[in-house]
Image (cartoon, rainbow, N blue to C red):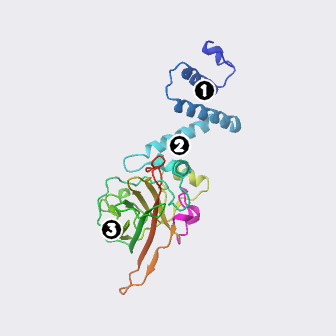
């Protein structure tokens, strides 16, 4: 055991630089210089794992420069309309893994998923039965559903936030010069039976943005950039955990290779096609969204494309 009174140069003798960094963190924590115990524990864990990676892979300086360059590029691609850091967390499976840890759902409850970088808290209110589509483009989709408690009780007045991509797989805030603001997004209040309904268009699946460092990394690893078609929901009610989830088109060919690990069996739904007199295809979707009592920490939007 190291003597805390020993001069730093002697206390760090024989340690690698990463180990010495960890030793300094420990020394600072003992002296009360690092009051955040969670941060201390996290950094000690990170440095320990980094040392293990160095011992195993023995990277050279060019590889270190490549890593720093990649992280720098992620920063350059992040702005008010694009969150490449969130995309990186999603593509690594980190966002989905943290949701699984922090927002577990018992059997019968709708699973949580990351909200994604395209969520907007300022979406407008939409009346029940109203339309989210502001540009009239795409095949019509009528969505009906009910918000219920895990015990089966309808949740009157539950707040239902919805957003999704258009029929080209693009969100409104990805192309602000081509789609009306707030296109394909809105907030509804469920009726006394917890039911809600709205009109929109059938979304298309899409690939993660292919022009950035995250896409380049996935491509070099031989991984898919595809996301199956889906609708995002964020549902809240007093006394219940907020549900952030995605409902997927089970017929989408990318269901088995979602690039951000959001697909779960309970979230697959049928987007039913219906014939129409004028030849235009229409679709319908009916679903139940089941919330858990607020007996644990609440869940808010984290990650997700």
From the top left corner, tell me how far across and down residue 303 is, in percent: 47, 50
Q: Residue 97, percent across and down?
A: 56, 50
- In what element is the residue under mark 2? helix
Image marks 2 and 1: residues in contact by CB distance under 8 Å: no
Q: Where does the magenta region start and end?
A: 251-267
On the image, numbered disc 1 is attached to which residue?
Answer: 22
Lower position in the chain sequence, tag 3 or tag 1: 1
Front-most of 215 and 305?
305
Callout 3 crowding tier (Cα within 10 Å): few <14, some 14–19, many ≥20: many
Dominant SS of magenta comes to loop
Disc 3 versus disc 1: distance between alpha carbons? 54 Å
Q: Looking at the image, tell me whether mark 2 or mark 3 is earlier in sequence order.
A: 2
Q: Is residue 126 above or below residue 120?
A: below
Image coordinates of residue 150 in percent, x first then y, are 48, 60
Query: 30 left or right of 130?
Result: right
Q: Which residue carries the number 2 mark?
A: 70
**Residue that numbered label 3 is attached to:** 133
User: Disc 3 on helix, strand or loop?
Assistant: loop
Closer to the chain start, of discs 2 and 1, is 1
> Which of the 4 image quarters holds residue 153?
bottom left
Q: Residue at x 59, y 25 (%)?
A: 21
Residue 255 is inside the magenta segment: yes
């Amino acid at each position: 055991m190291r003597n805390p009174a020993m001069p730093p140069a002697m206390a760090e003798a024989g340690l690698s630089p990463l180990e010495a960094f960890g030793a300094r963190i420990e020394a600072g924590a003992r002296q009360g210089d690092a009051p955040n115990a969670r941060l201390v524990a996290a950094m000690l864990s990170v440095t320990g794992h980094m040392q293990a990676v160095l011992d195993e892979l023995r990277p050279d300086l060019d590889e270190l420069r490549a890593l720093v360059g990649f992280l720098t590029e992620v920063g350059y691609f992040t702005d008010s309309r694009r969150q490449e850091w969130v995309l990186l967390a999603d593509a690594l499976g980190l966002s989905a893994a943290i949701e699984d840890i922090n927002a577990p759902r018992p059997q019968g409850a709708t699973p949580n998923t990351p909200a994604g970088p395209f969520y907007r808290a300022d979406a407008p209110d939409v009346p029940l039965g109203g339309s989210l589509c502001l540009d009239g483009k795409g095949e019509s989709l009528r969505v009906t559903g009910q918000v219920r408690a895990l015990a089966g009780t309808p949740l009157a007045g539950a707040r239902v936030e919805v957003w999704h991509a258009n029929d080209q797989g693009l969100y409104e805030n990805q192309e602000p010069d081509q789609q009306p603001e707030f296109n394909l997004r809105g907030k509804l209040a469920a009726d006394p039976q917890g039911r809600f309904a709205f009109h929109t268009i059938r979304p298309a699946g899409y690939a993660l943005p292919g022009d950035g460092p995250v896409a380049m990394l996935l491509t070099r690893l031989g991984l898919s950039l595809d996301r199956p078609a889906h609708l995002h929901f964020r549902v809240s009610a007093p006394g219940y955990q907020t549900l952030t989830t995605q409902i997927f088109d089970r017929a989408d060919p990318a269901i088995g290779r979602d690039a951000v690990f959001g697909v779960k069996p309970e979230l697959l739904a049928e987007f039913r096609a219906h014939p129409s007199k004028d030849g235009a295809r229409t679709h319908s979707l009916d679903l139940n969204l089941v919330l858990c009592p607020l007996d644990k920490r609440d869940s808010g939007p984290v990650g997700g494309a």
